[in-house]
Image: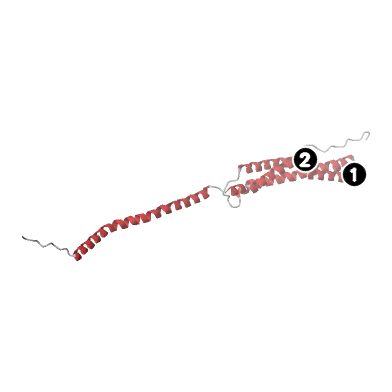
Amino acid sequence: MNTTPAKTTNPDETAAAQDAAAKDTETKDAPGTSSGAGDSATAPDDLSTQPEGDAADDGIADEDLEPDPFETARHGVGAGAAAVVSAALGVVALTGAWSGRVAAERETLIGQIKTSGGGSAAQQISEIYGDAWHTTALVNGVFAVLALLVGVVVLVRPAFGAPADRPQPAWVRAVALAGVALGVLGVLISAGMYFDLFASLPSAGTPAGG
């Protein structure tokens, strides 16, 4: 009976073969694993940083596009106030002011004092009535000139100085134009009153039997 001796396995050779197989497996898997890990590591960073950049850009764009309500409210306040003042002065020039009435009454009183000791009828008319009439016209003319000057300044102001970032509001120009128109009309009427163009002073008639 023939017996074949059993082949014995060397433990050292088995361990060396297993180590070689393990190294081959690690070498094959290493590039794919490193690239996959790199992609997985960089992808969240890209995704996380991109929204922040977009959010920052959106925030800057919103700030640039949306005007400041307080800045908008402050824009044109001074010019608007000056335009309203011009229109108000023009109205006062046409209707008369208390200062004009006071000045006219003062001239009337002065005329009465001058003619109290005697005087001709023409002198009394001129001193009591004519001077008061001319004083009223002069005061109204001063208000008309002020209205005209303030309105013109408001209209021409944007052409001088530093250029404004926003155009002058339309209502400011409209009110300023109204003030200029009232001022011109007041100047014309006051000049006509002062120089007796619309109505001359009354004249004293010749006494009967003179």
**SS state under label 2:** helix
Q: Secondary structure at mark 1?
A: helix
Relative to residue 58, is residue 34 drawn left or right?
left
Give the quadrant of residue 88.
Answer: top right
Residue placed at 68% from the left, 47% from the top? 150
Residue situated in front as seen by the camera: 41 or 98: 41
Q: Quadrant of residue 32?
A: bottom left
Residue 93 % position (x, y): 74, 42
Is disc 2 surrounded by few (<14), some (14 to 19) or many (20+) residues within 10 Å?
Answer: many
Residue farthest along the front direction in this orientation: 1
x, y percent for residue 140: 76, 43
* Whether label 2 touches label 1, CB < 8 Å: no
Tag 1: residue type? Thr
Identify the residue under disc 1.
115
The quarter of the image holding the N terminus is bottom left
Rendered residue at 65%/45% (across/down): 80
Q: Nearer the viewer, residue 191 or 78?
A: 78
Residue ID for mark 2: 193
Residue 1, above or below 77: below
Foreground residue among 68 and 106: 68
